[in-house]
Image (tube, rainbow, N blue to C red):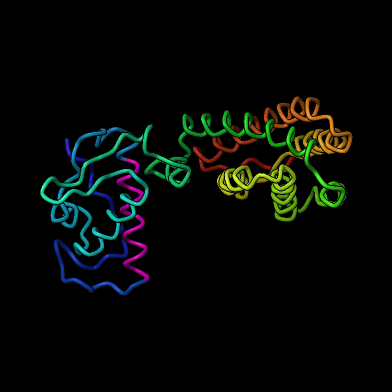
Amino acid sequence: MSPERPTLGESTSGGEGREGDEPVPVLSTLSREITRTLTRRIVDDVYPAGSKLPTERELSTEFGVTRHVVREALKRLEALNLVAIRQGSGIVVQDLDMAGGMEITRLLLKREDNTVDRGFLNDLLDFREQIGQTIVRLAAENRTDEELARMKELLAERRLAFHDQKKLNDINSELLQLFAQATHNRVYQMVLNTLIRLLFELRAKYSIPTELILQVQRVLEQIVSAIEQRDGEVAGLLAGRHAILMRKQLEHLARAEDTETPPSQP
């Protein structure tokens, strides 16, 4: 069975259309939507590894856009290592587990209906727990006095921001980034930046229960104390506790998003 044709909304051209019909901003938006849809199909094995995507002409007809828009979407898929475009052989789907990178995590977190993919969220949280423990261990070993002082400042600011969700999210983000910075390893910083963007995008839409905010505050204070004492082992154990709290929170938010009913602040 062929995939259901999506509604992209912005396009006014049907079939192949004429090259250049769409203004550049609309073209970019359409091609990104097509990239997202095709990525989701690859992840869901609608197009398994080794198979071929439909031709540019067929995709143009399916999505109701010009072939130029389709071509831009395919270039994005190729840049993400999800397909290989071979002259004379078509558009071949690559093995996601071997070729996929951090660049596609945002696409994988949401299904085509824009609800959270629980399986992928669970994988993401497992990874975040492991890397979080490693990061704070290294931060305890490598942090500078200036970085430690800023961590303490952020904790003090966080205590005053419990009822300001946006400010709280900004502080949480900066604090986690500071943990990664204190490792003095740029790879950890880049990976954590990706995770922060993904998880905080999900959290930003909903209120967080005050009791959970308080629990997280206490654990973060203990982590910073362990970092101050350069006790990486304790810091890592506490990061595991922090990850458990984050998992509870994000799973709660994912359920709320599935029902499109944001949880209320108690």
In the image, residue 178 sits, relative to residue 232, either above or below, namely below
Residue 218 horizontal side relative to residue 57, left or right: right
Occupied quadrant, residue 40: top left
Residue 89 horizontal side relative to residue 126, left or right: left
The residue shown at (70%, 46%) is 184
The residue shown at (51%, 43%) is 260
Where is residue 111? Give x, y as percent. Answer: 40, 40
The residue shown at (76%, 53%) is 164
In the image, residue 211 sits, relative to residue 70, either above or below, namely above
Is residue 199 visible in this depiction of the protein?
no
Whether 148 is among the magenta residues is: no
Between residue 85 and residue 4, name the one nearer to us: 85
Where is residue 179? Give x, y as percent. Answer: 73, 43
Is residue 95 visible in this depiction of the protein?
yes
Between residue 2 and residue 100, name the one nearer to us: 100
The residue shown at (18%, 57%) is 60
Where is residue 104? Give x, y as percent. Answer: 43, 45
In the image, residue 140 sits, relative to residue 178, either above or below, namely above
Q: Quadrant of the C terminus?
A: top right
The magenta region covers 25-40
Where is residue 246? Give x, y as percent. Answer: 67, 34
Q: In which quarter of the image is the N terminus?
A: top left
